[in-house]
């Protein structure tokens, strides 16, 4: 599963205006929850785990909302048309308006331009542990955000009524980062990490996503995950060493029967093509190929990273 086309922006704007009139008119249903992730474009993270746990629940009606027509079609094929809807559609507005709880990962931007129901619990599940600054905790300065930036942050995070956390320490950091009172945090742990800690199911499915075909009798290659984080003020330099030798790396990977899987952050620039041409064992594993980073962490024999939360996810699995 990779990236999907989005609903055209004029349609999103139209339904955004329509939602301001229609959403308050809907009556909330007792056990209806709606979920989405990654700005409405993805099917990943904590909401994905929660949705799949609830999709067959006898009393709770869980519905996934997306702004991607192609993702909507794919998920309807897996879970049934009654469990999936486009955000920017009349049915999407009805599902959202009837929800008692709304699960998301990136604040209200997960429901682009749409008004969220005031009667619903808005539950931020987030998508990683706090290893870097952002939002109100601005990188490189202790100065508060300017007026315009504060208004954007209030729009995205002020409607949140509950924020999942894994500990009081995480709650405190996220409270200061997102401007949400500590009382709004719920130290439930993260469903995604509980799933991450389950025994790996082998690497065959992962290798298939990466386009690697293992011949009969061949040993399963090791996966080395190389996943740096995103920096606003600079771009990732892959293998940033003056003495880097692509041929030596290729020789090492062959000797170890290993694949070097490059995982750029979604907001970063593409991996240089010349780097990928340097070895057939250096492969791109961006979100177009493998949407869930956790699938790579779960299958990794080793991880190379910096201060990405992937570092902590690797520790959960005791990956070197």
Image: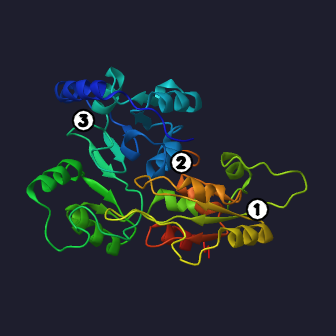
Q: Residue at x 43, y 34 (%)?
A: 63
**From the image, which quarter does the C terminus lie in?**
bottom right
Under circle 2, the secondary element is: loop
- Judge whether 274 appears above or below 39 on screen: below
Q: Are marks 2 and 1 in contact (CB under 8 Å)?
A: no
Task: Name the secondary structure under disc 1.
Answer: loop
| Residue 39 rendering spot, x and y as whole percentages | 36, 43
In the image, is residue 148 above or below residue 181?
Answer: above
Residue at 27%, 45% in the rendered image: 108
Can you tell which of label 2 and label 1 is closer to the viewer? 1
Q: Residues under labels 3 and 1: Cα distance?
A: 45 Å
Which quarter of the picture shows residue 9? top left
Task: Count residues near mark 3 (Cα–Cα under 10 Å), then give few for <14, some for 14-19, many for 20+.
Answer: some
Distance between mark 3 and mark 2 Cα atoms: 24 Å
Residue 215 placement, left or right of 238: right
Q: Nearer the viewer, residue 198 or 188?
A: 198
Crowding near the residue tagged with mark 1, few <14, some 14–19, many ≥20 C-alpha atoms within 10 Å: some
Which one is earlier in the sequence, the residue at label 3 or at label 2?
A: 3
Q: Is residue 151 left or right of residue 138?
A: left
* Residue 265 tag number: none
Query: What residue would you read off at disc 1?
Result: 221
In-front residue for pair 124/119: 124
Please report the residue visible at 29 percent of the width from the left and 71 percent of the height from the top: 173
Q: Which residue is mark 2?
A: 291
SS at mark 3?
loop
Q: Position of residue 279 (x, y in %)?
A: 69, 60
Please tell me which residue lies in front, 278 or 264: 278
Looking at the rendered image, the quarter that the N terminus falls into is top right
Q: Which residue is mark 3?
A: 113
Residue 198 appears in the picture as rendered: no
Q: Is residue 176 visible?
A: yes
Furthest residue toward left: 147
């Amino acid at each position: 599963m990779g990236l999907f086309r989005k609903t055209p922006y004029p349609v999103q704007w139209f339904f955004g205006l329509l939602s301001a009139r229609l959403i308050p008119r809907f009556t909330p249903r007792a056990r209806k929850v709606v979920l989405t992730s990654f700005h409405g474009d993805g099917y990943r993270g904590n909401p994905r785990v929660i949705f799949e746990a609830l999709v067959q629940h006898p009393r709770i009606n869980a519905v996934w909302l997306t702004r991607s027509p192609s993702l909507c079609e794919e998920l309807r094929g897996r879970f049934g048309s009654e469990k999936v809807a486009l955000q920017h559609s009349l049915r999407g507005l009805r599902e959202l308006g009837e929800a008692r709880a709304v699960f998301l990962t990136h604040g209200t931007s997960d429901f682009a331009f749409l008004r969220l129901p005031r009667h619903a619990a808005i539950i931020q599940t987030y998508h990683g542990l706090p290893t870097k600054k952002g939002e109100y905790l601005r990188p490189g300065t202790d100065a508060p955000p300017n007026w315009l930036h504060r208004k954007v942050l209030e729009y995205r995070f002020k409607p949140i009524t509950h924020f999942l956390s894994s500990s009081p320490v995480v709650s405190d950091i996220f409270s200061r980062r997102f401007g949400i009172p500590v009382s709004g945090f719920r130290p439930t742990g993260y469903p995604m990490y509980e799933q991450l800690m389950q025994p790996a199911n082998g690497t065959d499915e992962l290798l298939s996503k990466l386009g690697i075909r293992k011949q009969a009798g061949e040993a399963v290659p090791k996966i080395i995950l190389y996943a740096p984080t995103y920096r606003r003020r600079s771009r990732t330099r892959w293998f940033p060493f003056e003495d880097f030798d692509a041929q030596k790396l290729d020789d090492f990977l062959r000797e170890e029967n290993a694949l070097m899987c490059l995982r750029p952050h979604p907001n970063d620039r593409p991996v240089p093509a010349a780097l990928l041409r340097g070895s057939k064992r250096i492969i791109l594993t961006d979100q177009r190929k493998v949407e869930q980073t956790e699938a790579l962490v779960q299958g990794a024999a080793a991880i190379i990273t910096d201060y990405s939360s992937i570092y902590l996810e690797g520790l959960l699995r005791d990956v070197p």
